[in-house]
Amino acid sequence: MGYYPTPVSVVERVKSFLKFPEERVTVLDPCCGEGLAVKKLVEGVNAKTYGIELDKRRAEEAKENLNHLLACGYESVRITNNAFSILWLNPPYDFEKMDEDAERANERKEKTFLMNTIKYLKVGGILIYIIPQVRLSKSIAKTLSSRFENIHVYRFMDEEYEAFKQIVVLGVKKKRNGPYETEYLNLVQVPSFNLDELPQLKEPIYQVPAGENVSLFKSKTIEIEELSKEVKESPLWKKMREMSVAGNGGLKRPPLPLHSGHLGLLLASGCLDGLMGEGEDLHVVRGKVIKIITTYEEIKGDFIEERNVESYQVSIKILNRDGDIITLM
Ligand SMILES: C[S@@+](CC[C@H](N)C(=O)[O-])C[C@H]1O[C@@H](n2cnc3c(N)ncnc32)[C@H](O)[C@@H]1O
């Protein structure tokens, strides 16, 4: 799944570009791997970190390293827009596959991740975008120059550059989109340019803004574990249990066994609704009384007399363990 974690030495140098405020910052990594890059980035900083990771094993690791983690694809999340101080983006170096989204098939993931996650970064927030140098296409250059300002591009340090020839693009999200010719012309040359190595700065050049409240950070896919945890804590579920377990209506066990007439009345009134029996005999009972109005017409001389007669019909049904609904009355 294109797991190339950012080397610690690169994270340390990127950090030297950033001046953090005293207020809390929010950092999003939408493909966080084990979450180590962002964990390192905010060491000693007042920060809340948010990660998304598709690979289950790496997501488990990332839960230990980040404050909030969604174990799913970044495509299936709901997150507050314009909320994050930093977007750390080191996407998989790969093509979108046909079965993922036919419209985007054959587009590079470096581009789709960027296009789809910029919205989470607040205006004035810092983008840290790591991709192989040759992947800085014209369309990526266009997106970067129209959405970001104060852009700097460096290549990884020699020993790290060797493997995947990666670069780091840093920029500040603009208030308004708009073409920026000089930045664009600089960026389109990047793939064929001898870039400077990422330096360790003495003085940071980017002021990181404080983070906004991230009120929404959820996966659209339902994880069975998460679901059962949420259901257990839900007040609605508590109410459901109260209503579905027989005897919770305040009825006490009678001192003598009921005879069938009493039992019929209790069943029909719904007082014994809920789970009954044990083991093989476990079943759900539902009793109710339906009011039926029958209309009779009688000709009386020159006019018709209409009479409504009310009657009550008892219905008792059980649902057994095999899912059969049996009507007793
Ligand atoms: C290049 S690694 C980057 C890891 C980390 N951000 C870092 O900088 O060290 C890319 C990660 O993206 C994950 N990934 C791939 N497709 C994804 C998707 N659709 N949504 C979220 N994560 C994805 C991979 O499993 C991998 O761990």
Image (cartoon, helix red, strand yellow):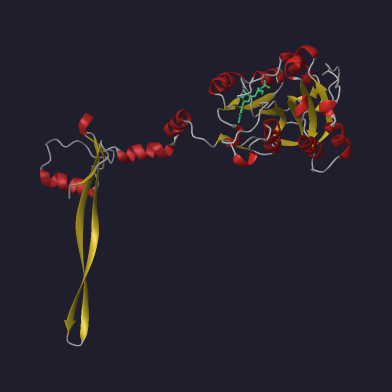
Q: Nearer the viewer, residue 45 or 88?
A: 88
Residue farthest toward the top in the current orientation of the protein: 159
Q: Is residue 278 visible?
A: no
Tell me which residue sits at (74%, 18%) in the image.
11
Q: Quadrant of residue 286?
A: top left
Q: Quadrant of residue 100?
A: top right
Q: Quadrant of residue 5?
A: top right
| Rendered position, 272 above or below 95 | below
Tell me which residue sits at (11%, 44%) in the image.
260
Q: Nearer the viewer, residue 68 or 74?
A: 74
Instruction: Assign the N terminus to one quadrant of the image.
Output: top right
Taking the image in four quarters, ligand 1 sits in the one at top right
Q: Left or right: where does residue 63 sit relative to residue 131?
A: left
| Rendered position, 122 above or below 157 | below
Percent across and percent down for residue 131 are 73, 26
Percent across and percent down for residue 173 are 78, 36
Percent across and percent down for residue 59 are 57, 23
Q: Left or right: where does residue 178 sit relative to residue 40?
A: right
Q: Left or right: where does residue 50 sit relative to residue 187?
A: left
Tell me which residue sits at (24%, 56%) in the image.
290
| Rendered position, 106 above or below 64 | below
Percent across and percent down for residue 197 are 83, 18
Residue farthest toward the bottom in the current orientation of the protein: 302
Q: Left or right: where does residue 255 sit relative to residue 283?
A: left
Q: Is residue 147 visible?
A: yes
